[in-house]
Image (cartoon, rainbow, N blue to C red):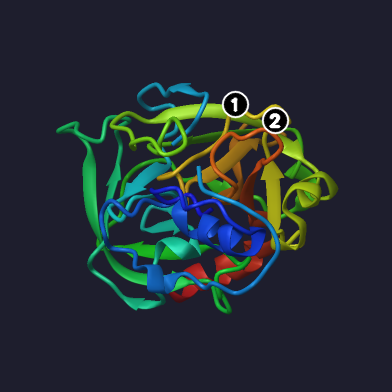
Amino acid sequence: MARTAQPPTKGSVSTVATLARFLKSTLAAGTIALAAVSLQPTSATASPAPVVGGTRAVQGEFPFLVRLSMGCGGSLYSEQIVLTAAHCVNGSGNNTSITVTAGSVDLNSTSAIKVKSTKVLQAPGYNGVGKDWALIKLAQPINLPTLKIADTKSFDNGTFTVAGWGATREGGAQQRYQMKATVPFVSDASCQSSYGADLVPGEEICAGYDQGGVDTCQGDSGGPMFRRDNAGAWLQVGVVSWGLGCARAGYPGVYTEVSTFATAIKNAAATL
């Protein structure tokens, strides 16, 4: 399921996988309508992932990470543009309804930075399956480090870091404090053995442990999956998208493969 807030009922892979893409963001805010979910038949069971099996992040550890008021995560692509998941937003156009919280691992901190959105650009051609990315333009810049995106598949391997304010267990509540965890790359072949035709291997990348136990969860949708590049800098390789439940054995998390859309993201950002 999408990594929004409330875990969908388990069902056939097709229906569940689509709902999974929707539910990794949280429905708690009530701003994401079920009508936005495309229930096209596909072929596997899936659900969304805060970070399960993780530890609390240290203040300033991931300064590029932001929280969105509709219950999703995101990253600072630039000081005035946030990269998140397409299923977290409702189309493209002017939008002043989203509040972005940044600069603090504690969402209730008085020092947290809060900025409103002005525009949203959902991935062209997004229909609920694949292409799960979107950009949000902010009313004013946030003076914090940004997160570079991978423009080559050479970093789509190894061990990745995920972080967010999502639930720490399937069906649990979202968190006040940012959590973090590391998850290993899972090959397309292995991921397809779990999700079948629901996986779009050319547009998605999987990560997680065979035995489960560590994963993103409801409320983490749209947040980044990242790793160090050759110079030791953080590099975003994925966007939290969907998965079956949270941290279930045999069902890794599914992320938008950023390198596949790097050029499209860059071009879209230029239009904002």
Judged from the image, the secondary structure of the residue bearing numbered disc 1 is: loop
Q: Position of residue 109 (x, y in %)?
A: 19, 31
Residue drawn at 75 percent across, 47 percent down: 194
- Horizontal side of 162 relative to 179 (left or right) equals right
**Mark 2, residues whose alpha carbon is within 10 Å: few (<14), some, or many (≥20)?**
many
Residue drawn at 60 percent across, 74 percent down: 40
Observer-nearest of 109 and 193: 193
- Residue pointed to by mark 2: 209
Res 177 → quadrant: top left
Q: Position of residue 13 (x, y in %)?
A: 65, 58
Quadrant, the C terminus: bottom left
Spatial distance from mark 1 to mark 2, Cα to Cα? 7 Å
Residue 231 visible at all = no
Q: Are marks 1 and 2 in contact (CB under 8 Å)?
A: yes
Observer-nearest of 164 and 191: 191
- Residue pointed to by mark 1: 213
Q: Position of residue 238 (x, y in %)?
A: 61, 49
